[in-house]
Image (cartoon, grey):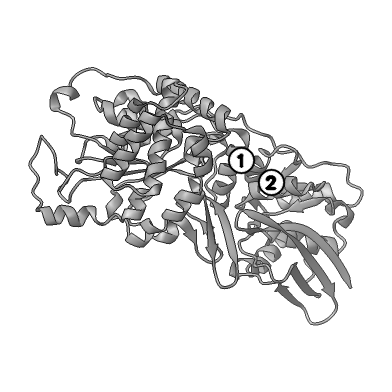
Amino acid sequence: MSLAVIHSRALDGLAAAPVSVEVHLANGLPSFTLVGLADTEVKEARERVRAALQSSGLSFPHNKRITVNLAPADLPKEGARFDLPIALGILAASGQLDEARLDGFECAGELSLAGQLRPVRGALAMALALRREGSQRRLLLPEASAAEAALVDGVEVRQAAHLLDLVACLLPGAEQELPRAQVDARASTWAGPDLLDIKGQAAPKRALEIAAAGELSLLLIGPPGSGKSMLAQRLPGLLPPLSDEEALESAAVLSLAGSFDPACWGQRSFRAPHHSASSVALVGGGSPPRPGEISLAQHGVLFLDEFPEFQRPALEALREPLETGRILISRAARQAEFPARFQLVAAMNPCPCGHHGSQVQACRCSPEQVVRYQGRLSGPLLDRIDLRVEVPAVPPAALGTGPDGERSASVAARVAEARGRALHRQGCSNARLAPQALDQHARLGPAEARFLDKTATSLGWSARSYHRVLRVALTVADLAGAAAITTTHLAEAVQLRRGFPSA
């Protein structure tokens, strides 16, 4: 009878819970049993591990009763990440590897039938969990996954390309060390489209600058071809670079979905799901729970084009994350929490034909059709969007002229200065100000208070709308370098929240 214990981790939302892979070899009828609340992918590891060991010229204990327990037994395990721990546990239990050397590692990896190590999701989550717990163990990962985990400072990450590479370093008495994972050059420069490419549209460009400075949500309303998508695609180029902690949070969520590219380290995500996306695709869900688009856009931009064409339940599911910056997915058996601190940019036509209110082309829609189309967006959802801006059609004469306006780099410099003022004053962006802090940092003089109260009463604003206009006005003041909010700043904020063209 032989027993070996290998350390690994299972993904539980954004967390990576520790898992002990216990491998027991005993006499009896030959069998290979895997227990511990494992899903189908994990159970299929039996065939992958057997073939990988045999293809690598290693001994597989065919005449033993093999029992693999993934503890704790009440934690669901999914994916092929336990292939490598199971294979190493079998080799250690059968005396082919030094178990004492394995005790200093936590490992994960998928095995091919030939013994190559394939990447797994959530390598960054594993490294972050190790650092958070202060563990002295080292991570042992496939090469592609190790490059992600190495971005976490304070965690030693070793990498391997083949099972035989591990065996050569873990044999009893072996002095060879596994190579350390190398951190690629961290690139944070935005290389996307430039704001200078957009002809005209001075007012929407100004709204885009204010949205970037205050981390505010934005709805662009205009006819087809007016440049709404182009404006949205240029928002990431106006935002300040991510801090190291923010970059880690963003990369960790992308790693869970298997879509993180180390070459894009420090760049803000830009997610643009199709309007056929379901509520689960947008906010997350499934079994086990996976992050949705709002989490994959963590500290980045979520662009929803053709906004009213999204399913109503999917849009309504955005309401709470827009307020709280997180999403808690509850199921009968478990819960999973994912971050959702994203900047929403939505675009829509004002009516089914797209030309309602246009001075260039006549609208074919009846007033009832216009009202019905705009009514696809609920009042509570619109109330949570800070800026609602019309994007008019560009006259043909303006399209043939040279570029006008500013480059993204110039606007980004002003945005960075405004963000810096907000961070120095209150420690967060204006969009994240709680009502009590907003009262403290956005105090109005008597004339400004009368103007805002009169406007709020005449337009029938809710308390949320009132506070959001204050945040916009505070951002306008930050861009102007003003010490206090003036009536001019408030007027611009009110203008940027006027909403739809009238039906």
Question: Of 163 and 296, which appears nearest the observer?
Answer: 296
- Residue drawn at (79%, 66%), measured in percent from left and top? 22
Q: Which residue is more in the foreground, 244 or 146?
A: 244
Disc 1 on helix, strand or loop? helix
The residue nearer to you, when weighing 469 against 198, is 469
SS of the residue under disc 2: helix
- Work out which residue is located at the far front of the displayed protein and give it: 446
The reply, left or right, for residue 444 in relation to residue 404 is right
Instruction: State the residue at coordinates (84%, 60%).
Output: 92
Rendered location of residue 228, percent (x, y): 28, 37
On the image, numbered disc 2 is attached to which residue? Answer: 128
The residue nearer to you, when weighing 439 against 481, is 439
Q: Position of residue 475 (x, y in %)?
A: 43, 30
Q: Residue 126: x, y in percent?
A: 68, 50
| Label 2 Cα crowd, 10 Å radius (few <14 / some 14-19 / many 20+) | many
Query: Does residue 73 sit above or below 349 in this rendering?
Result: below
Q: Quadrant of residue 500?
A: top left
Residue 453: % across, % down: 34, 39
C-alpha span from label 2 to label 1: 9 Å
Disc 2 marks a residue whose amino acid type is: Leu
Label 2–label 1 contact, CB within 8 A: yes
Whether residue 78 can be seen here:
yes
Find disc 1 in the rendering and name its residue: 248
Is the residue 392 above or below the residue 21 in the image? above
**Residue drawn at the location 58% of the way across and 33% of the way down:** 427
In the picture, measured across the screen, residue 242 lies left or right of residue 181, that is left
Looking at the image, is mark 2 or mark 1 earlier in the sequence? 2
In the image, what residue occupies the spot 88% across and 69% down? 2
Label ID, residue 310: none
Under mark 1, the amino acid is Leu
Task: Confirm whether residue 192 shows in the render.
Answer: no
